[in-house]
Image (cartoon, grey):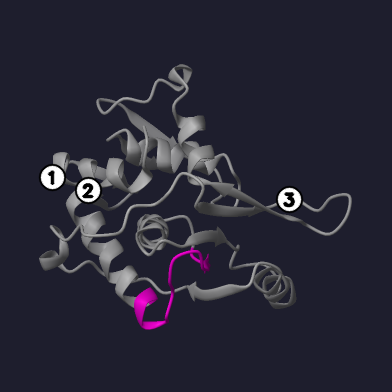
Amino acid sequence: MNNILSILGENMRKYRDKVAIAESSRSITYGDLNALSNIYLQQLQVKGVQAHDVVAIELERSIEAIAAMVAVLKAGAAYTVINKDYPEGRKQSMRETIQVKATINEVLQPVPGLREVWDFPARTPEQLCYIVFTSGTTSTPKAVGIPDRGVLRLLGDERLGLAPDKTISHISPLEFDASIIEIWGGLLSGMTISLL
């Protein structure tokens, strides 16, 4: 694995009609996930999001939240997940701490004509992928940034057993770093992610 977007783009084409994410009552294919992420990307572009900006995702664990994550990376930006149920003061403090440029908190629908669109600038290994906040049990929660290379290094561990013929369960809250293996491990390996 060498570049998150190139691997993801290859999987979006190769597994276009395969289920990428399954929820209890609905699912989405890799092709439709690409289309949905392109809708979120258009929204980010309207908001002026550019490379190296930070975007907050305030959605429940869902197909849409994962599509929003993909869109943020397509924009060259980094994302953080802020639990929508946090008190508004805490959410605002988190946004200010990491200088959030835009927030995604809407559920959007895919447009079929955007299934094939994949023309985005490559990301560098040092580019910030996501920001996670520490729990704050001993003091104020701190923001920790993880670059693309950190995600790829983690997912490159063969002991994880990531393979396209498997399904991976997504049970972790989005704001926890364990969700990285479940989401990016699944998508970058061509797996089906099962939201439980």
140 inside magenta stretch: no
Which stretch is magenta? 44-59
Quarter residue 150 falls in: top right
* Residue 14 % position (x, y): 15, 39
Query: Mark 2: few, some, or many residues within 10 Å (few <14, many ≥20)?
Result: many
Q: Return the residue nearer the eye: 5 or 83.
A: 5
Q: Which residue is mark 3?
A: 134
Compared to residue 13, the image places residue 86 above or below, namely: below
Mark 1 falls on what kind of element? loop
- Amino acid, disc 2: Tyr
Mark 3 falls on what kind of element? loop
Q: Return the residue nearer the eye: 121 or 172.
A: 121
With 62 as the anchor, is 15 left or right in this view?
left
Q: Which of the two discs, 1 and 2, labels the residue nearer the N terminus?
A: 1
Query: Mark 3: few, some, or many residues within 10 Å (few <14, many ≥20)?
Result: some
* Labelled pair 1, 2 in contact (Cβ < 8 Å): yes
Taking the image as drawn, is residue 109 in sight? yes
Q: Which residue is mark 1?
A: 17
Residue at image position (15%, 45%) is: 13
- Amino acid, disc 3: Thr
* Residue 127 % position (x, y): 49, 52
Compared to residue 196, the image places residue 162 above or below, namely: above
Q: Which of the two discs, 2 and 3, labels the residue nearer the N terminus?
A: 2
CA gap, disc 1 and disc 3: 37 Å
Q: Which residue is mark 2?
A: 30
CA gap, disc 2 and disc 3: 32 Å
Which mark is in front, 1 or 3?
3
- Amino acid, disc 1: Asp
* Residue 196 % position (x, y): 44, 42
With 70 as the anchor, is 100 left or right in this view?
right
Query: Mark 1: few, some, or many residues within 10 Å (few <14, many ≥20)?
Result: few
* Residue 109 % position (x, y): 26, 69
